[in-house]
Amino acid sequence: MATSEVQTVHTGADKAKLAAAIVLLLGSFVAFYLLSSRGALAQWAALIVGVVAAVVVFGVSESGRQLVAFGRDSWREVKKVVWPARKEAIQMTAYVFAFVLVMSLFLWLTDKTVEWLFYDLILGWRK
């Protein structure tokens, strides 16, 4: 059984960075709505600047660095995947559609058989 140790050690500075990122993000949304009288350009500028600042502050935190490292590792793993050729993909798709068709026919037949058994033979509701 694989065991993985999860370490959630956050320093006070790291928590402050995360809090600052959240405050910047919320502040950018508030500024967007408060600057409605100044025009759309001011609204969108405040929103974009606030969101970018929040992303930068989050990026320098430990959680942000871990997220970036996770993204890099994920991309590295995606590059290792051997993708099927077009012919193989089409064949597998056809197999899936055929299986779905067979299963839907089987379930429909089962449903109609049970319906006939209960309503016509046992209960006698349909005459």
Image (spheres, rainbow, N blue to C red):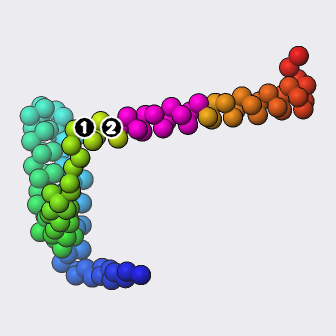
Amino acid found under the numbered disc labelled 1: Lys
Residue at point 16% right, 32% down? 37
Left-right relation of 125 to 80? right
Can you tell which quarter of the image residue 40 is in?
A: top left
Residue at point 42% right, 39% down? 96
Helix, strand or loop at label 1? It is: helix
Amino acid found under the numbered disc labelled 2: Gln
Q: Position of residue 54 (x, y in %)?
A: 16, 58
- Which segment did they paint magenta? 93-105
Find residue 91 and name its label.
2
Residue 121 belongs to magenta span: no
Q: Quadrant of the C terminus?
A: top right
For the residues bearing labels 2 and 1, Cβ distance under 8 angstroms: yes
- Assess disc 1: are there few (<14), some (14-19) or many (≥20) residues with their C-alpha within 10 Å of its C-alpha: few
Q: Position of residue 101 (x, y in %)?
A: 51, 31
Q: Quadrant of the N terminus?
A: bottom left
Helix, strand or loop at label 2? It is: helix
- Assess disc 2: are there few (<14), some (14-19) or many (≥20) residues with their C-alpha within 10 Å of its C-alpha: few
Q: CA distance from mark 2 to mark 1?
A: 6 Å
- Front residue of this view, candidates 81 and 15: 81
Residue 103 belongs to magenta span: yes
Query: Looking at the image, is 55 positioned above or below residue 19?
Result: above
Circle 1 is placed at which residue position? 87
Query: Looking at the image, is 14 positioned above or below residue 87?
Result: below
Q: Note whether residue 20 is visible.
A: no
Q: How many marks?
A: 2
Q: Position of residue 125 (x, y in %)?
A: 88, 23
